[in-house]
Image (spheres, rainbow, N blue to C red):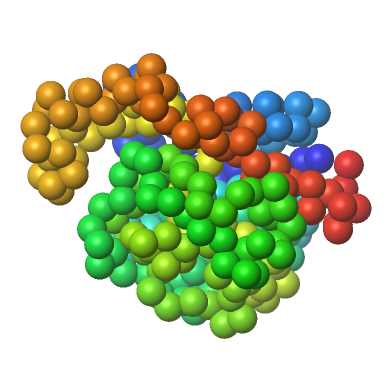
Amino acid sequence: MKLLIVEGNNEVTRIKREGYGIKPYHITFQEMLRFLVPKARTDVAFPTDKGKNLPSTSQLKEYDGVLWTGSSLSVLEDIPDVNHQLTFAETIFESGVPFYGSCWGMQVATVVSGGKVALGGNGLEFGISKPIELTELGKASPFFANRNSGYSSLCIHFDEITKLPENAQVLASNPHSKVQAMTFRYKKALFFGVQYHPEFKTSDMALITSFLSKKLIDSGRFATVAEVEKFAVGLSEQKGLPQEIINYQLHTQEIMAWLRYIAKNHGYN
């Protein structure tokens, strides 16, 4: 299986975060894929970088699937770093290659295919998600074959989907955001994505929590630095966390289900 990972953050953001010990998101995805499908080959595309040399439509057809990471960007911004990613997402849909997105990846795919994203009405969803319930379509979906409804996941997002692309099916929701997972076809490709971050480990979330301390306090998610750090330590030590977050195989299971689905339905090895 040959997979392409699309990095959602620009080089400046990646370097700044790496200085704090946070792995670039494409590295997180590579590590996850080595865990889930050890024999898979992965390449990385950087649509915001200079000299990016992104694969063309025909070159994309050499891949069995595309996975799009999260990002610190907002799709609501009309800036080159966002627009370059929207353009590349359009190319992926034209190629017909199966397409998965976490958080930012789902938002980019939504906007390109005619849906809308806006600042979430309930503000920031961060850390441990509120219980995510599968819809009837979600319960029947191969992407959630082993998920129990009412699960939690690691998450961080201000924006959310407010208008679905044509023919989209909502697979999961929670009290914070109505669209926590969905699938749809656009142009030649099938898309599946989630609003949360199944690829994260608790150690990743702990570092991100500390790094975003001021932003989290300014947003009202925490009142003090001490509260932020207490939450980060709890993540690191996995205190009182649901089993579906502690167990990485359980946390990543919808991505594994997607990989199995594309292998079965597209004849990949």
Q: Is residue 2 visible?
A: yes
Residue 137: image location, x then y, percent: 64, 69
- Quadrant into which the C terminus falls: top right
Instruction: State whether residue 252 is above or below residue 163.
Output: above
Whether residue 89 is visible here, answered yes or no, is: no
In the rendering, at what x and y percent does residue 76 appear? 31, 66
Residue 209 appears in which quarter of the rendering? top left
> Where in the figure is residue 81, as x and y percent of width and height?
37, 54
Q: Is residue 212 left or right of residue 129?
A: left
- Measuring 65% from the left and 41% from the top, which residue is drawn there? 253
Q: Residue at x 72, y 72 (%)?
A: 188
* Horizontal side, residue 207 vs residue 65: left or right: left
Q: Position of residue 248 (x, y in %)?
A: 58, 29
**Residue found at x 70% / y 47%:** 146
- Name the residue at the bottom extreme: 166
In the drawing, does residue 26 fall left or right of residue 236?
Answer: right
